[in-house]
Image (cartoon, rainbow, N blue to C red):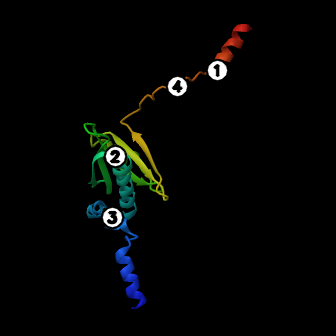
Amino acid sequence: MSAASDRAKASEKAPSANWILQHPTYQQMKELNVGDSEQIHAAFLVYMDLTEVRRWKEVSCVKSPDLQVVLLEAREKDGAPVHTVLPLPVHQSLCHQSIRQVLDRGFPMLLCAVASDSTLVYQRMTDGLVTPDPPVGPFEDAGRRQHRKRRQHR
């Protein structure tokens, strides 16, 4: 047998190195014709994280014609509201108008920054300013209390 036929047989037995390109969801994302292969790759990584790691429900991909990106729509758990997830490679910039267009879809929004090493960082985006929740735990502001005590002793 020739070396080429041996390699062909070995590749038939071994899983493809480019399994992502063969995945049905990746193919579906490509069919949306957004034109940016890096954003499609980022969207696929976020899709896999949501479905396989976080176990979100009803994860689907949709095209944003205005932004020319793949958005994901998903529920964190059964009966939870639908969220729109905007996967974005970290080197791509984003303007307020783009965020506004995603928020105007009417669903809570998550921005997911996707690093070149496949690290994912999610950021919840809101319509307007939101007061943060108070810290949880037995925290005290000892510095201010000591300052007040010193002032009282003078």
Q: Residue at x 61, y 21 (%)?
A: 141
- Label 2, secondary structure: give it: loop
Between disc 3 and disc 1, whose residue precedes?
A: 3
- Label 3, secondary structure: give it: loop
Q: Of the residues shown, which amino acid type is indicated by label 3?
A: Gly
Bin the neighbour count of mark 4 within 10 Å (Cα to Cα): few under 14, some 14-19, many 20 and up.
Answer: few
> In the orientation shown, which residue stands out farthest toward the bottom?
1
Where in the figure is residue 50, as x and y percent of width and height?
35, 49
The CA span between labels 3 and 1 is: 55 Å
The CA span between labels 2 and 1 is: 41 Å
Where in the figure is residue 96, as x and y percent of width and height?
40, 45
The CA span between labels 4 and 2 is: 28 Å
- Label 1, secondary structure: give it: helix
Q: Quadrant of the C terminus?
A: top right
Between disc 3 and disc 2, whose residue precedes?
A: 3
Between disc 4 and disc 3, whose residue precedes?
A: 3
Q: Quadrant of the N terminus?
A: bottom left
Of residues 61 and 93, the one drawn nearer to the viewer in this rendering: 61
> Which quadrant holds residue 128?
top left
Where in the figure is residue 26, as x and y percent of width and height?
31, 62
Q: Of the residues shown, which amino acid type is indicated by label 4?
A: Gly
Q: Which residue is mark 2?
A: 55
Between disc 4 and disc 2, whose residue precedes?
A: 2
Q: Which residue is mark 3?
A: 35
Where in the figure is residue 60, as x and y percent of width and height?
27, 51
Asked if labels 1 and 3 touch by Cβ distance under 8 angstroms, the answer is no
Bin the neighbour count of mark 2 within 10 Å (Cα to Cα): few under 14, some 14-19, many 20 and up.
Answer: some
> Which quadrant holds residue 149?
top right
* Residue 3, above or below 77: below
* Residue 57, above or below 62: above
